[in-house]
Structures are given as C-alpha cells and as structure tokens.
Image (cartoon, rainbow, N blue to C red):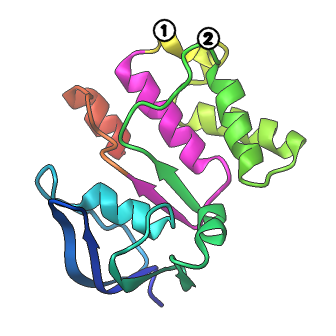
Amino acid sequence: MSVIATESLSKRYPRVTALDRLTVDIGPGVTGLVGANGAGKSTLIKILLGLAPASEGSAAVLGKDTAREGAAIREQVGYMPEHDCLPPDVSATEFVVHMARMSGLPSTAARERTADTLRHVGLYEERYRPMGGYSTGMKQRVKLAQALVHDPKLVLLDEPTNGLDPAGRDEMLG
C-alpha cells in the first residue's frame, strides 16, 4: 500500500514552477526528500497535508485525496514545520497539550501523551519554561514533540535538523 502517491503533480506560482509533473509512490518506512533550496520540498508537504492546492495532477496520503480530505489527513499525520512557529510566552507543555487537543485527543490523554512525548524528545526537565528562552535545538525538539504527540500514522518533518550543531543533528535523526 502506498503511504504517499502523486500523479503528474504540479504547483505553479506567477513567476516560478515549484513542482512540475511529479509522480511518486512511497511505501511504508523512512524516506528522505533531498533537494536544493527552492526545489519544492516544502510546497510538496503543504500539498500533501491539504494546506495548499495543486495546480494540476493529484496526490493521496494514506489513501486519502489531498484536495478533498485534508482535515482527515492532518488527523493521521504529524507535521514538523521548517520555520519557528512557537509562541515565546507559552511553555512546551501548554503548547504540546494544545496541539494534542487540536488533533482530537481528550484532555487527560493529551496531558499524559504530552508528558511522555516531551520526555521522549529530551525536554521533560524544561517543559514548564516559556519557549522564548529555548535554544534552537530545544525549539526543534518541541516541534518534533507536537508532531508526535497524537501518535500519527505518518510523520512529515520539514528541515528537522535546521540550525542544529552536529551533535544536535545526530540526536534529532536518532
């Protein structure tokens, strides 16, 4: 079964073509998408999550059509965005609990999963500190935690090692 499938997928902007007739079929397992800046990797992820429309072609994630079933896809997929999108005056615990609730977890389960997930990514001791004081590596860990907290079937990581030193890169990939 395909986890991700695209057929002649294109995304065009007024002055640039980000994707040009991309056809892929990705099965279960770990797959890395490598390309230069501006190659269309982030654009592809946004289309796969149903957050941006394709100009033409089709895409499916976990058997669901990205153009029609974006919300259902996002319930089953964890997404770690490339850019820093964390509110500086909120703790990691508050943020990850909120994201767990947004993914449909009940309040008690959201709190329990948040504690477990923050422990898993190595932020348990710092979980109540406002994120504005976090290092780049700690912020990357929070973004990873919120992508994992609802136990998704698929995780999409956009530049997960961005801004990390070599040791942090190794930890993130581990």
As helix, strand or loop, the secondary structure at mark 2 comes to: loop
Residue receiving disc 1: 133
As helix, strand or loop, the secondary structure at mark 1 comes to: helix
User: Could you tell whether 171 is left or right of 49 in the image?
Assistant: left
User: Could you tell whether 55 is left or right of 52 in the image?
Assistant: left
Please give the name of the residue rendered at 33% of the width and 45% of the height, measured from the top-left corner. 173
Answer few, some or many: residues within 10 Å of disc 1's Cα (few below 14, many 20 plus, some between 14 and 19): few
Q: Is residue 135 above or below residue 105?
A: above
Residue receiving disc 2: 129
Q: Is residue 143 above or below residue 37?
A: above
Where residue 92 sits in the image (x, y, percent)? 62, 24
Name the residue type under label 2.
Answer: Arg
Disc ID at residue 70: none
Camera-side residue: 67 or 92? 67
Q: Is residue 136 magenta?
A: yes
Please give the name of the residue rendered at 88% of the width and 40% of the height, measured from the top-left corner. 108
Name the residue type under label 1.
Answer: Gly
Q: Is residue 37 magenta?
A: no
Q: Give how far apart the Cα atoms at labels 1 and 2 are.
A: 8 Å
Residue range of the region highlighted in magenta in the rendering: 135-157
Please give the name of the residue rendered at 41% of the width and 67% of the height, measured from the top-left corner. 47
Where residue 35 sits in the image (x, y, percent)? 14, 58
Camera-side residue: 48 or 152? 48
Q: Residue furthest front?
A: 14
Where residue 79 sits in the image (x, y, percent)? 49, 52
Where residue 41 sits in the image (x, y, percent)? 26, 59
Q: Is residue 163 above or below residue 160?
A: above
